[in-house]
Image (cartoon, rainbow, N blue to C red):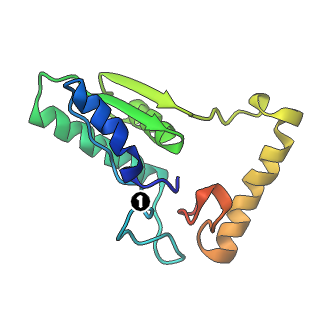
Amino acid sequence: MAVPSAFYRPLVAAFEQRGWTAQTLRSRGFGRDETAASRNVDWSYDDGINDIADAVAKARADDPDRPVIVLGHSIGAQLAAGHELNHVPSDGFVGVGAAVPHYKHYPFGGVPLIFMGLGVPLINRVWGHVPKPMFGGPGAGP
């Protein structure tokens, strides 16, 4: 979240130096010339998951013999996991800095996580989107 795809250009270049084909997918609302989230502009996890599904399908159509590996960072890893569970899976999945949103993995039994989880929908209702600096906003509503 809040990281434009251009941030990953050095990673793509490193993959290409090894002879691999690589590409990034845009982070909705965070790239140059992207419309930021607002009360009137919104998107969902499903939209991000479908973006990945479209990219995987295109990569397979472009070169059916080439394996397709999906790498996701942070929320991108969550979206990639959603893709793997809900679409024809890729040939490999790598999650980097991916959170496990389970209360047992957080201090105090996840109580702060509960307050955050309850607060995000309320904040979204007031602003119509998730504003900065929450989760690197402005981001789409939950």
Residue 112 in view in this figure: yes
- Residue 101, x across and y down, in percent: 67, 36
Amino acid at circle 1: Arg
Kind of element beneath mark 1: loop
Q: Quadrant of the C terminus?
A: bottom right
Residue 12 in the image: above or below residue 118: above
Q: Is residue 57 or residue 22 the one in the foreground?
A: 22
Q: Residues within 10 Å of mark 1 (few under 14, many from 20)?
A: many
Image-quadrant location for residue 21: top left
- Residue 3, x across and y down, in percent: 48, 53
- Residue 25, x across and y down, in percent: 33, 48
Q: Residue at x 35, y 40 (%)?
A: 10
Q: Residue at x 25, y 43 (%)?
A: 55
Residue that numbered label 1 is attached to:
28
- Residue 26, x across and y down, in percent: 35, 54
Q: Residue at x 37, y 66 (%)?
A: 32
Q: Is residue 121 or residue 71 the one in the foreground?
A: 71
Residue 88 in view in this figure: no
Q: Residue at x 25, y 36 (%)?
A: 22
